[in-house]
Amino acid sequence: MHVSRWARAPSALQALFVAAGLLPARALAAPAEPRAIDLRWEAPDGCPPIDEVRSEIARLLGASEQRQPIEVGIAVAREGGARLRLDLRIHAPSPGERVIRGDDCASMSRAAALIVAMSIDPDAVARNAAAPPAAQPAPAQAVAAPVAGAPRPPPPAPRRPPPAAARPPAAAERDLEGALWLSAQIEQALVPAIGVGLAAGGGIRSGWFRADGAAGVVPSSSSRIAGRAAGAEFRLWFVEVDACARALVRPIGVYACALGRQHWLLARGREVDEAFTRTAPILAAGLGTLLEWRIADPLKVEGALHAVVPLQRPRFVVENLEGTVYRPPAAGLSARLGLALAF
C-alpha cells in the first residue's frame, strides 16, 4: 500500500510543535506512574495475598500525584487461637509503627492498606475511601402495577450522606495495650540472704515503649553479728517504676529496662537483751531485661531480671555490741516470674 508524504505530516508537525514548546509535553507523555511503594507482606494462610493489599492501596490513592518512594513492611502472625497480630512498619521516608489486633485478617489488611495510603496522601484517601471498591451495574427492578385498594407503601427513609473523611477501622486504632500482672519476687540485692516474696503491678505499652509500676514484699530474711547469736530478722517492702524499650517482638517479646525503686527495710532484733525495731528507707536504681510470652490471648508469662544498685547503704547494729548485723551490698540482683493479663 502506498502512503503519501502528507499522511505522515501530522506526526512531523506535532514533533515540531513539541520542540517549539507549543504543545504541552504531558499531552504526549504516557500517564505518570503512581507513587513507588516498596511493600513487604508476610501473612499466614487464609490472609489476602500481597496483590490485594496493593490494589486496595491503589484504590484509596486513586489519581494521587504523590510520587515520593515509600518503604513499608507488614507482618501478620497468630498470637493464640484465632487471634491475629499485624505489625506495620514504615521505614522511609518518615519511620512509623502501628500494631493491629483482631480475628479477621481481611479487615486487618484493609486497615493496614488505609494506614499506608493515609501516610502517602490523606487528601486523596478522603476523596476515594467512601467509594465502593468496584463499580457494579445496578440490577434491573421489576415494576408492578398498583392494585386498587392496596395501601401505599411508606416513603423510603432518607439516606445519610457519606462521611466527609475516612477513618481507619477500630482495629487500627488499638495501638495502646494495658496489662496487670502478679509475680513471685526473688530478691538478693537488699536483704541479707536470698529472699522470696510477692510483687504485683500493671503497665501500658505503645509501639516499642512499655512503662510499669509495681509494689512488693519479701517477708523474711535474717542476719547476725559474726561470732554471736545476736542479730535481726528483716522484711523488705518496695515500690518500683520501670521504663522499657522493646528489642525483639517474636517469638518472645524482649525489652531492655531501667528502673527506680524505693525500699523500706525493717529490722527486728533477735537474741538480744533489749528488743528493737528499725526501719531504713533505701532508694535504688537498676538496669535489666524483661521477657514476655503470650501463651493464650490475653494471658502472658512474664519474667524480669535486674541488676540493682542501692543509693544508700545504712548499717544495722545492736547497741552495746560490737559488730554489724547487716549492711546492704553495693549491688545485687532482683528477679520476678509470673502471669500477666493484657487488655
Image: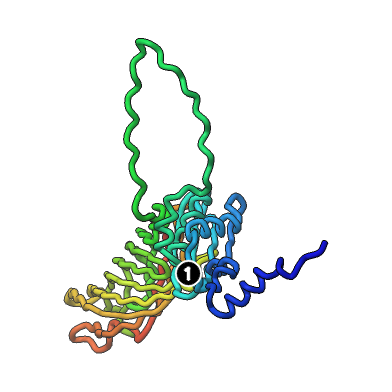
The image's colour scheme reads rainbow
319 on left or right of 174: left
Point out residue 322 in the picture as x, y percentages from the top left corner: 24, 89
- Residue behind mark 1: 66
As drawn, the residue found furthest toward the bottom would be: 322
Q: Position of residue 182 (x, y in %)?
A: 36, 59
Is residue 270 placed above or below 325 in the rendered structure?
above
State the residue in front, 268 or 55.
55
Q: Residue at x 53, y 71 (%)?
A: 71
**Where is residue 201 drawn, in percent x and y?**
32, 63
Residue toward you, 195 or 110 = 110
**Quadrant hosting residue 16:** bottom right
Q: Nearer the viewer, residue 258 or 86?
A: 86
Rendered image quadrant of residue 49: bottom right
Figure check: 167 above or below 217: above
Front one among 230 and 44: 44
Residue farthest toward the top in the current orientation of the protein: 149
Image vertical order of residue 131 relative to residue 235, above or below: above
Q: What amino acid type should be assigned to the residue bearing mark 1? A: Gln
Name the quarter where the N terminus is drawn.
bottom right
Q: Residue at x 58, y 52 (%)?
A: 47
Residue 306 visible, this orientation? yes
How many residues crowd mark 1 within 10 Å: few (<14), some (14–19), many (20+)? Answer: some
Secondary structure under tag 1 reads: loop
Judged from this view, the residue extending furthest toward the right is: 1
- The C terminus: image quadrant: bottom left
In percent of the image, x 35 and y 58: which residue is there? Answer: 180
| Apparent side of residue 262 relative to residue 125 in the rendered image (left or right) | left
